[in-house]
Image: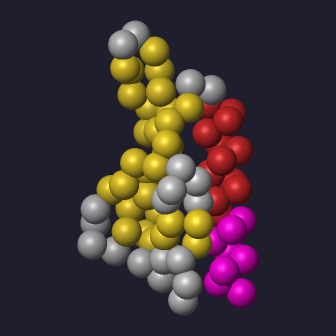
Amino acid sequence: MPLVKLSHGAAVNPESLKYITIESKNIDGKIIYGIMLRIDDNSDHWITGYTDKDEAIAKIKEYTRAIAAADE
């Protein structure tokens, strides 16, 4: 199966993807919502971060649509 391009130079093989999640971190007094991927070797990969939670959620939805489309 081909890689699915995400954003910020990241791509993922849908067959090796376990899940996508948002992790919040406090960096320099600001809450950052980081988008993380976990793949089948149990390694986590930071894709990007947002200061707006709704933006992070919208990006996750975009990623899942792209990954689901590659699965068809």
Q: Give percent across and percent down for residue 50.
A: 56, 32
Placement of the C terminus among the 4 image quadrants: bottom right
Q: Give percent across and percent down for residue 51.
A: 56, 25
With respect to residue 68, does 71 lie above or below? below
Q: Residue at x 66, y 47 (%)?
A: 59
With respect to residue 63, does 35 lie above or below? above
Chief secondary structure of the magenta portion: helix
Placement of the N terminus among the 4 image quadrants: bottom right
Q: Residue at x 47, y 21 (%)?
A: 31
Q: Give percent across and percent down for residue 62.
A: 70, 56
Residue 59 magenta:
no
Q: Residue at x 42, y 78 (%)?
A: 16
Which span is picked out in magenta?
65-72
Q: Quadrant of residue 37?
A: bottom left
Residue 68 magenta:
yes
Q: Quadrant of residue 42?
A: bottom left
With respect to residue 23, does 72 lie above or below? below
Closer to the camera in the image, 47 or 9: 9
Q: Give percent across and percent down for residue 22.
A: 50, 43
Q: How is the image coloured?
A: secondary structure
Q: Residue at x 65, y 63 (%)?
A: 64
